[in-house]
Amino acid sequence: MKAQRRKEMNAMALGMLGRVALSGVLDALLLWGFVHAGVIQSDIALFYGMAVVVVTLVFYLLIRSGFQRRSKDPGLTFPQVVAALLMQTGFLILAPQVGYLFLINFFVIYAFGALGLSTFWNAVSWLIGSLALVLAFSLSSAHLQFPVSNNLSQLLVCLSFILTLGRCIYLANMMSRMQRKITEQNQQLVKAMKRVQELATRDELTNIENRRSLMEILAVEQKRFQRGGTPFCIAILDLDGFKSVNDNFGHAAGDMVLKTFVEIVRNEMRLSDHFARYGGDEFVLVLTGTTVQEGVTALDRICAETEMYDWSKFGKDIILTASIGITDFRPGESIDEAFQRADMALYGAKAAGRNRVMISPDTFESSDGGTTIRAF
């Protein structure tokens, strides 16, 4: 991974260096045009071309050697900006006849620097450029010219402004693309983090809360109960006969049964309730703001819907029912204590013949009517 990252960084840095070199070549060609227009001597254009080659070669070797990986500026943007500023300043002093060309290149240089420099280093580069301009103007201001004495020089001046404008627009567009790419990457990161969060808190098969998330939900409900006495109930649900489905018809059929059971429960629960897969075919329903009396009514419906559902579509002669144990959360107890009581109620429902709701002890007086047994 690190090697791949280094390769990408080198490719990016070399790509930017190539664009800088191309910009220097364009300036050198303009200078040769001014040579033919009789504005400057040929040695200025030749010297400028050689300077472009030397500076490009130095930075190429630095990037290829991996030197830039030791710094916080992997593209060597700041050194390139400073080198370009000093180079333009030097030629502004050497060839004031076309000094405007080197002056407008400052805009291209700072546009390039904006791609990779922080606010601090942009400020430092601006300070260096400002000092360089003060030096250049103090030495050559009397000789600065705007070469438009003939048609060719006028054309070259116009072309130089067009190319400078094009380079600035190109760099601005590149910055815009980089910002869009960063935005897209951030959006992808947010989606990935959301997906990780879902995987951490939701059951992959049934897409309901998992055991870890259930514990967090119960802790929240416990705090609400302790603050304001808001009641809640814990119900443990188990599918009677589910093991035989896996044994006789395979896990694919078993998975479909679990998903279907989840839908049955969802149809009977409220949006404020929480439903979680505790493990295997065992589920937990947290009934918020609910007393046991109110919770039993919904749980009875779940038992009835489970019994009436046509499970044979997943395998011949499959018959499934639900056993449920429920308890209310009580003052001064822990979540574990309440959960154990609900589990005891589920065990009681199984022992009493399955396909029923059993309320934990000491909640209500005994009643054996229907599929609900209110105490054991």
Image (spheres, grey):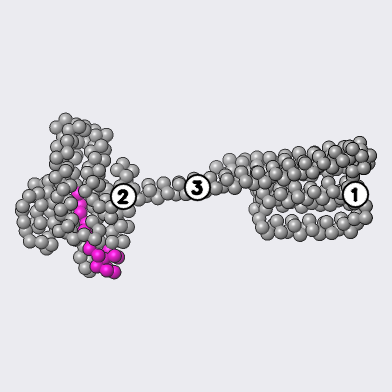
Is residue 143 among what the camera can see? yes
Q: Disc 3 on helix, strand or loop? A: helix
Question: Image point 7% across, 50% down: which residue?
Answer: 370
N-term-proximal mark, 3 vs 1? 1
Question: Image point 62% across, 40% down: which residue?
Answer: 7
x and y, in percent, of residue 85 in the image: 79, 51
Which residue range is magenta in the image? 222-237
30 with respect to 224 (left or right): right
x and y, in percent, of residue 316 in the image: 16, 30
Q: For label 3, count other residues whose C-alpha is less than 10 Å away and answer few (under 14), some (14-19) or many (20+).
A: few
| Residue identified by numbered label 1 | 145
| Residue identified by numbered label 2 | 209
Residue 234 magenta:
yes
Question: Image point 89% across, 38% down: which residue?
Answer: 151
Q: Residue furthest top?
A: 316
Is residue 71 among what the camera can see? no
Give the number of marks: 3
Tag 2: amino acid? Glu
88 with respect to 351 (left or right): right
| Residue identified by numbered label 3 | 187
Is label 2 or label 1 in front?
Answer: 1
Measure how far apart labels 2 and 1 are at the Cα level: 76 Å
Quarter location, residue 42: top right
Q: Quadrant of the C terminus?
A: bottom left
